Image (cartoon, helix red, strand yellow):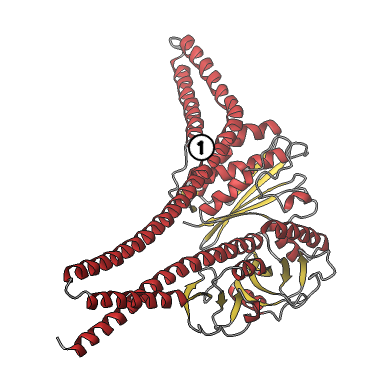
């Protein structure tokens, strides 16, 4: 074989060894960088999810809505105190409430010299976009602090009308500092390609730097549309591996040339090199498989936790229903005992009159049949109310649900001397719901009203049903003392109650049921001298 051909083959072998080694290590570096990038993105997405949940929860907060609608400064200050507490609990930088004109009425920093209260932020993009689209996200410098941060905004509506905007600002200095301590620098760009977060703070609000001989991986941030995290890792290790591979190949070839007569050993050496490369590949694939298995296990664990949570929530709803049933059953005992006593009396009279007055005997038997039908209705409603919900939604006649709820609460209402007035229960009107769960909501509201009227003269509860093309509204009022002002903002929070023996879960569960049915349960704004006023809206069937 000509020497030139042998030399050319040797050079090609060295180059190939160099390239294989370099690419193998490069793939490993990129895989490790990708895992690191995914971890950082998950951390960022977790922070965004928490703060987005804060904004979404406050957008549905009754106290914040009442402060915006009424313009009451006392309510606004109560909201500020609440925002101050939530900011400390959730790790937000600042939370503030803006009216439709852009004026801040409440803020978590309301007691600080640089309080946002009274400031106008109508010029901010997150304000204008939330007004038109309902939500917004903007990364910008703070007007007062000059510190960069991400602003999340959410609209607040009352009766379908915009009444204000809730804004949550968060800063990422701690997270960026953690990135800076890592050997792998990274940054996040917004949809315009501008750097908003970086391990090197000097890169903020500028275009990202060139890779400059480094390896780069990219990962989209799901919680912020258009945001992308880029992580850099040094490519030097891959070049060193390539040089090492080339040197190894050179040494092998030198050995081959020096020991040409010992061909078998050379072949075995090449086989050993090949086996080492395959083993390295297998080890790398095993590492990837192990990591994938761990990630799948984490996902499965999270799914199981969510299923357990859903099961516990269902059990809590059923426990609340059974507790209510226990209260209802005590009163319904009289409803059953009375017709039973009448049946016994009529039966005795029937026996005595069987021969002397057959007509009166037949009348007694007809009355007995009527009494048994009454008992059957009561026990049927009790069994229906006690059974566990199936979760299946269908067209439910409104009148039947109201009649069942009225029957279940009748005895306690009569004991308290309260009058229940029903208006607008059209016999043909139907609602999209599940009868058992809807009855639970109505029984809870009626019983709360009955308990609130304990010391009220001439107690009256009014249930008014109205409907339009898409919605059925249940409007329940009483003429009692109303909701205490201190409880208005916490009414639908777990374990918040003014009752000495209450757990504060009834209204929370009732609102969750309403939402599961595709509707909403809310407290109407308190009116001076008026009792409590609850509004339940559901989809019309």
**What residue lies at 54% left-to-right and 83% top-to-bottom?**
193
Q: Position of residue 210 (x, y in %)?
A: 52, 85
Q: Position of residue 432 (x, y in %)?
A: 47, 54
**What residue lies at 66% left-to-right and 47% top-to-bottom?**
462
Residue 425 can be seen, yes or no: no
In terms of depth relative to the viewer, which is nearer, 355 or 192?
Answer: 192
**What residue lies at 60% left-to-right and 25% top-to-bottom?**
334
Number of numbered tags placed on the structure image: 1
Secondary element at image label 1 = helix
- Dividing the picture into quadrants, the one containing residue 57 is bottom right
In terms of depth relative to the viewer, which is nearer, 166 or 151?
Answer: 151
Check disc 1: other Cα within 10 Å, few if <14, some if 14-19, many if 20+: many
- Dividing the picture into quadrants, the one containing residue 390 is top left
Residue at the spot of label 1: 385
Q: Quadrant of the N terminus?
A: bottom left
Q: Is residue 14 above or below residue 286?
A: below
**Residue lying farthest to the bottom in this orientation:** 4
Q: Position of residue 337 (x, y in %)?
A: 56, 22
In terms of depth relative to the viewer, which is nearer, 114 or 471?
Answer: 114
Q: Is residue 235 above or below residue 51?
A: below
Q: Position of residue 43 (x, y in %)?
A: 56, 63
């Amino acid at each position: 074989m000509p020497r030139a051909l042998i030399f050319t083959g040797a050079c090609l072998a060295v180059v190939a060894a160099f390239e294989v080694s370099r690419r193998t290590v490069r793939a490993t570096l990129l895989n490790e960088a990708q895992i690191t990038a995914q971890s950082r993105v998950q951390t960022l997405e977790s922070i965004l999810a928490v703060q987005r949940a804060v904004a979404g929860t406050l957008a549905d907060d009754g106290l914040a809505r009442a402060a915006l609608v009424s313009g009451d400064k006392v309510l606004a200050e109560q909201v500020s105190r609440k925002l101050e507490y939530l900011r400390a609990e959730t790790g937000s930088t600042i939370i503030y409430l803006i009216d439709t004109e852009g004026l801040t009425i409440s803020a978590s920093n309301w007691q600080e010299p640089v309080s946002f209260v009274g400031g106008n932020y109508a010029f901010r993009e997150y304000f204008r976009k939330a007004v038109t689209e309902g939500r917004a996200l903007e990364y910008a410098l703070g007007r007062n602090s000059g510190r960069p941060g991400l602003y999340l905004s959410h609209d607040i509506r009352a009766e379908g009308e915009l009444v204000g905007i809730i804004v949550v600002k968060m800063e990422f200095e701690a997270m960026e500092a953690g990135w800076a301590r890592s050997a792998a620098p990274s940054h996040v760009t917004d949809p315009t390609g501008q750097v908003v977060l970086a391990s090197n703070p000097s890169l903020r609000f500028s275009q990202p730097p060139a890779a400059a001989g480094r390896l780069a991986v990219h990962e989209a941030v799901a919680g912020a549309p258009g945001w992308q995290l880029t992580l850099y890792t040094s490519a030097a290790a891959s070049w060193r591996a390539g040089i090492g591979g080339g040197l190894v190949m050179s040494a092998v070839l030198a050995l081959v040339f020096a020991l040409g007569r010992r061909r078998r050993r050379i072949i075995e050496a090449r086989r050993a090199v090949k086996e080492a490369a395959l083993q390295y590949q297998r080890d790398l694939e095993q590492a990837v498989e192990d990591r994938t298995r761990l990630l799948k296990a984490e996902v499965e664990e999270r799914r199981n936790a969510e299923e357990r949570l859903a099961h516990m929530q269902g059990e809590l709803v059923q426990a609340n229903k059974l507790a209510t049933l226990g209260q209802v059953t005590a009163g319904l005992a009289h409803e059953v005992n009375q017709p039973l006593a009448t049946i016994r009396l009529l039966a005795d009279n029937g026996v005595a009159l069987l021969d002397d007055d057959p007509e009166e005997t037949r009348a007694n038997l007809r009355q007995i049949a009527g009494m048994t039908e009454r008992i059957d209705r009561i026990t049927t409603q009790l069994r229906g109310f006690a059974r566990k919900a199936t979760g299946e939604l269908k067209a439910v006649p409104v009148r039947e649900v109201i009649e069942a709820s009225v029957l279940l609460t009748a005895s306690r209402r009569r004991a308290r001397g309260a009058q229940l007035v029903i208006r607008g229960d059209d016999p043909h009107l139907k609602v999209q719901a599940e009868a058992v769960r809807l009855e639970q909501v109505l029984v809870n509201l009626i019983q709360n009203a009955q308990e609130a009227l304990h010391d009220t003269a001439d107690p009256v509860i009014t249930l008014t049903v109205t409907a339009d093309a898409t919605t059925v509204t249940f409007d329940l009022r009483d003429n009692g003392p109303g909701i205490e002002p201190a409880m208005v903002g916490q009414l639908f929070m777990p374990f918040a109650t003014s009752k000495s023996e209450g757990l504060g879960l009834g209204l929370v569960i009732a609102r969750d049921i309403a939402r599961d049915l595709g509707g909403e349960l809310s407290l109407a704004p308190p009116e001076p001298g008026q009792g409590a006023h609850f509004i339940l809206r559901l989809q019309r069937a």
